[in-house]
Image (tube, rainbow, N blue to C red):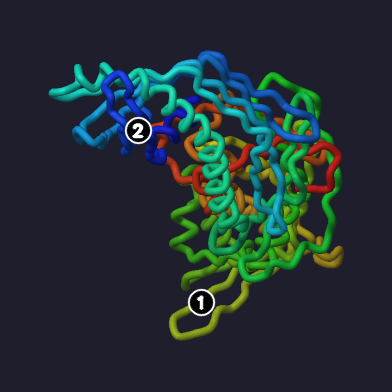
Amino acid sequence: MEMIEQMLKEKNIPDLKGSESLEFLKVDYVNYNFSNIKINAFSFPNTSLAFVPGVGIKALTNHGTANISTDWEIKSPLFQDTGGADLFLSGVYFTGIIVLARNDFGHPILKLQDCYAQVNHAHVSFSGELSVLYNSFAEPMEKPILKNLNEMLCPIIMNEVEALNANLSTIEVLTKIDNYTLLDYSLISSPEITENYIDLNLKGVVYPLEDLTDPPFSPVPFVLPERSDSMLYVGISEFFFKSASFAYFTAGAFNVTLSTKEISNHLVQNSQGVGNVLSRIAEIYILSQPFLVRVMATEPPVISLLPGNFTLDIPASIMILTQSKNSTAEAIVSMDFVASTSVGLVILGQRLVCSLSLNRFRLSLPESNRSNIEVLRFENILSSILHFGILPLANAKLQQGFPLPNPHKISFVNSDIEVFEGFLLISTDLKYETSLKQQPSFHGWEGLNFINGQWRGKPAA
């Protein structure tokens, strides 16, 4: 209701024009025009929304009231004048069905059918020096005002729906996450309406910035648990995170080279930190020149969602190089490894933020090299570099998170995240804040983002 009130106060209402005879004053006609009509306050004490399965959402309100201010102009054979007036409407009734659909580009579409609107009573109160005179013949004008107003209401509402669709058709369903990737949040089917919920089935695929080719694997259908304690349930499938892993790998985001100075900045300064790590490297190689650490993913990180457990295994290679002035980099040692990490999840603002923590680290060395103690000693050293250097750097970049689909000026409250087999479940309530100064988390969806509901057995992310 707060959203509707804000919208109505900002909308321009067409002028009310008409002509009436005032027999008691023996005036053949009075032409009137009410302009600059503004809704200052209204109340809909009896309002309900109900799902119409397979159709849409039925809205019903009655016993509504509204206070309206307006400018007026009156012309007759005897006089003409202008001024201000207040219009009080009561017995406001509206019913209609909002139909949700999808266009060919994955944008949501709204349609209004079975619209019926009526105002039962209107009272006009003129203001100004001659207000007593005008108020004396205000009552005969109220009936034609009501007639004109009732004829205008549904067309006004229909025009607003059309304007809304014009905005919806321009939304950018591709959202740029960062300099590496895009996120496709387009609808892949029309919303499903049941007696208890709305399902919005979004694509949920992450692409490399310059390549919108679908990843070489398919989404697996999943079913959300039957719950009703929260207002909104968002299901994010394993496919979504796999597409993100593949996209970042394809875009080269997992390749990083750190200098000695950068390593010092990111390693934690404690007994297990930079001093200890670098001294242990120096035990093996006397380094009189600066060195670099280069980490490169050899395959897309492997995503696994199991009940209560979200892991990311990163197959990569690591190389330590020295580089003296005016010379090319020379590799000291290079080896493959797999880092297994746990993924922590939290909702910050309107974004899902992930963080990584190292579970285990193992080198992938040929059996012939296993006896090389000098090389094997790097396992703990490189594990420390990953734990104290690379992962903090990765987590800093992950802080920007993934944008979650939600309406503008609506924030998530009482949110909870659960990991199930094959998908992530976000349960949350929603709070509307007129003063919430946030950009729409869905870039380009302006103030019209649709709440995405439950996916039930559909092959979507």
Nearest the eye: 208 or 368: 208
Query: Can you name the residue that lies furthest to the bottom here?
Result: 326
Say above or below: 292 vs 165.
below
Q: Nearer the viewer, mark 1 or mark 2?
A: 2
Residue 147 position, x and y percent, is 48, 28
The kind of residue on which mark 2 rests is Lys
What residue is disc 1 on?
A: 323
What residue is disc 2 on?
A: 38
Q: Residues within 10 Å of mark 1 (few under 14, many from 20)?
A: some
* SS under mark 2: strand
Q: Are marks 1 and 2 in contact (CB under 8 Å)?
A: no
Q: Residue at x 56, y 17 (%)?
A: 62
Q: Residue at x 61, y 41 (%)?
A: 450
Q: CA distance from mark 1 to mark 2?
A: 72 Å
Q: Residue at x 76, y 44 (%)?
A: 237
The kind of residue on which mark 1 rests is Gln
Residue 420 position, x and y percent, is 79, 34
Q: Which mark is residue 241?
A: none
Q: Is residue 231 visible?
A: yes
Q: Quadrant of residue 105?
A: bottom right
Nearest the eye: 58 or 199: 58
Residue 456 position, x and y percent, is 82, 37
Q: Residues within 10 Å of mark 2 (few under 14, many from 20)?
A: some
Q: Residue at x 64, y 23 (%)?
A: 49
